[in-house]
Image (cartoon, rainbow, N blue to C red):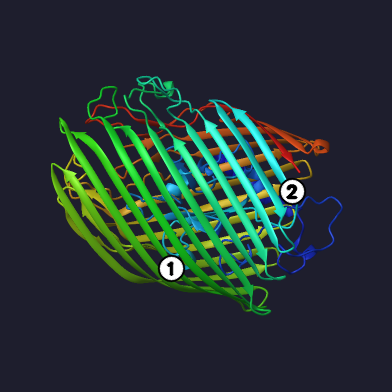
Amino acid sequence: MRIFIAVLFTIQASLAHAQTAEQTPQTTPETATTEKPAETYKLQQVQILGNKEDKSYLESTESITVIQAESYDKGVKADSLKSINGLPNVQVNKNDNTFSLRGINNIGVTGYQKDNLASILVDDVFQTDLAISAGAFDFWDLDHVEIYRGAQSTTQGINSLAGNILLFHRKATDATEGAAKAGFGSYGYKEVGVVSNYKLSEDLFGRTSVNVERYDGFIENVTTGNDRWGRQDKNYISQDLVYKLNAFDEIRWNIKILNNEAGGTYSQSTDPFDYKVYEDVDNRALTNNQQTSLRYTKKINENSSNETILAYSQSDQDATADADGTSAATAGTRYEDHKDSYLSVENLYKYQSEKVKNVLGLHYHDYVIKDDYNFNVLAPGPIPVRQKTEKYQNTYAIFDSMLYKFNENHALNLGLRYEYMQNKYDSYIVYGSTRTASGNEEGGILLPKIGYILTEGISSYGISYTQGYRTGGVSVNRWTSTVAEYDPETTHNFELSYKRVQDQLKVAANVFYTHWVDQQVLVQYAANNPYNSAIVNAASSELYGAELEATYNINAHNALTAGVGYNHTRFIDFKGPLNQNYDGNEFPFASPWTGSVNYTFKPTDAWNWDNTLRYLSSSYGDAANTKSAPEQWYLDTSLAYLMAQWKLNSEFYIRNVLDQKYVTYDASNAYYGTKVYQVNSPREFGVRVTYFW
């Protein structure tokens, strides 16, 4: 870990040699222009779109990582969450299934009630878990990524207690341009893609992108002879249309069609790195998603504008797996059928003047989740189990967030949101006998935030308080068929921030403390019976830590980006009904230390050598702190050559150069006597060729 801290302090020390405040005009550095020495290597302008009041980077107290397209739309970066693993206080768990921000797992610290603690939005559309499984997290034709750590509940509302990840793809313009790619790599990996931007009329522009990936995977099912057991076959189509009503007003419509067929992600060998499983039924999950967004932007006058955003997503997944996890047909095949839909409407009235940036928002969404499980359990003989659940959620919100500038140095950020939720839950269970259960829960909550920002030239200092929350709901005990409501859980978040932006150097640091009350946890009322369990408000906890990031364009040939994150998580009060005492335990999937260093060397305009080192310290895999994942190091490298005269770029890359091998999660089942090890991907080689026009 000391390597990351040393690199960051080296970059910080370089501030003494960078441009002084006296040489920089007292304006926002993202938009300022001034005469510079002949040898200046500027960073790309820092622009953020995720905060709804249109604050600049320096005006934001949030901990924000901005990833530009040229850093991630390349072969060495997998089109998945794994590519952001190891960024400061960002951890990707269980081989790409979930992620943690500041030690908080997005699907829940314990249990999984499908009201996520952190969310992903892609081009204005909230991404459900099924949408992510369908391949929505895709870097082809990427514009940039914004990662917000810490509660964003005042402006984003539900599903943002831990933060948000926002993906933005390129917008249709009046240019005629495009690109096509083809690549291949280890374990049968193949990719082809195309993007084309075109002008349909003087006012109507289109942009179409297609990305197709095939991957055999590195795990073989010995019993069935399937050497593509760990496959990932993805199809991604996106269509973007922009209609310019006049110089200021426009309508943007985006539609995506996604499809992904995936196998398993675990190994069962005594040596997990033999990459073999022994099941008589192959894992298969076929996920489809269709999503669309419509954004209407209108300028009302010199200071006011209005944006209306309509978004819709629907997904379905058909999955089969081995019910007992062995080579014998003891429990047969497990069948799962999942469906979801998400509809949202949001209106943002924005006012901006020399002193004020304000957004007044109205929000509504309708979220439906339907799950159907059909399988046998061994107790000890096969017993049929059927479980069908339906969850309905309606959310209404009004919010306002304002940045008020007293003068060029002092500003206050005030925000308040009122959100009202209605939750309905229906369940049908067959386990020995037939049980049905249903329940309703509704209520409202106020979510305030306040922040102060001191700006001094190219630097800003901030202090803020925000309240985060996750909605309450209805929990059904599948064994007793009893229904109980649980209340919303809330966090109180205190944060200090520092940001500095210069031509060659960008530095950001945040220190935070979070107190969590009425924490929703899954408790089990009988040993070895996961069906006799429920969600209750039975815990409180705290977390604190910091992030430090820096980007330094040393000269025309060398660039360095580094970041380190520290977080300490702890249950203050969490006792289970079976005399479990988790007080003082750390959260699952909460590495105390995370960090990454990226070094880019460009000896000429044609050659580009890119290297990324990522680190995650050891973390636990359960609330009891009995399972753990080891300390992890990953090194990725790529070498690209641009043949400008032919508009051709070729890239050779290696992921996990040192071929490090880790068991990231042990899900072995003592009752069935099966071994289940989630393992990281071994070393992979690849080549990508891209043609531009």
- The numbered disc on residue 177 is 2
Taking the image as drawn, is residue 68 in sight? no
Q: Is residue 174 left or right of residue 618?
A: right
User: In the rendered view, would you say 405 is above or below 220?
Assistant: below
Q: Is residue 506 left or right of residue 91?
A: right
Quarter in which the C terminus is drawn? top right
Q: Quick one: label 1 or label 2, which is nearer the N terminus?
A: 2
User: Residue at horizontal 77%, vertical 57%?
Assistant: 19
* Residue at disc 1, secondary structure: strand
Residue 174 x %, y %: 74, 58
**In the depicted view, which residue is nearer to us: 640 or 306?**
306
* Residue at disc 2, secondary structure: strand
Which residue in the structure is indicated by mark 1? 364
Taking the image as drawn, is residue 519 in sight? yes
| Structural crowding at the residue carrying mark 1, measured as other residues with C-alpha within 10 Å and reported as few (<14), some (14–19) or many (≥20) | some
| Structural crowding at the residue carrying mark 2, measured as other residues with C-alpha within 10 Å and reported as few (<14), some (14–19) or many (≥20) | some
Kindly identify the amino acid type of the residue bearing the numbered disc 1. Answer: Tyr
Q: Is residue 516 left or right of residue 688?
A: left
- In which image quadrant can residue 230 be found? top left
Residue 525 x %, y %: 17, 48
Kindly identify the amino acid type of the residue bearing the numbered disc 2. Answer: Glu
* Residue occupying the far front of the picture: 201
Residue 473 x %, y %: 29, 61
